[in-house]
Image: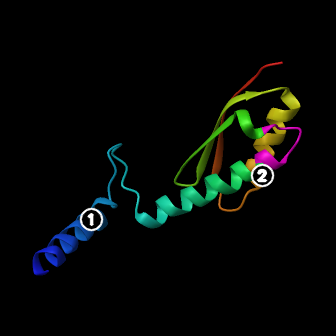
Amino acid sequence: MRAVRLICTWVLLGMLLGCQAYSDGSKRTVGEFTDDVQIKAAVKLRLLNDPEVKGLKIGVSVDKGVVTLSGRVPSDYARQKALRITGETGSVNGVEDRLSIVE
């Protein structure tokens, strides 16, 4: 029983310490990572709920509050609307546009 408790303690400690740095070299804290996940979910939900944007083909990634949109949209109007929707989402610090228009 004591060995199991010791192993669980070391595993938990390793997980907590491992959350401070990521393999991509960034030094995001657990809080920053969590904020980015929440921003991504909120942006993706808003894009999916808009019939003109058709958010299924738009990829959303977030790094320290900066959202990158990638993928395909049906028109320039949909592209501009996707950028506007993203910028208006709470906690977004910036928007990077990597969208392409495909009819």
Q: Is mark 2 on a helix, strand or loop?
A: helix
Give the spatial CA distance, label 1 vs label 2.
Answer: 34 Å
Q: Which image quarter: residue 24?
A: top left
| Whole-percent x, y for residue 26 in the image | 37, 49
Magenta span contains residue 84: no
Q: Which of 42 and 93 is in front in this view?
A: 42
Residue 82, above or below 19: above
Q: Which image quarter is the N terminus in?
A: bottom left
Q: Is mark 1 on a helix, strand or loop?
A: helix
- Residue tagged 1: 17
- Residue tagged 2: 46
Q: Which image quarter: residue 57?
A: top right
Q: How many labels does the image show?
A: 2
Which residue occupies 33% across, 45% down? 25
Q: Nearer the viewer, residue 8 or 88?
A: 8
| Whole-percent x, y for residue 48 in the image | 78, 45
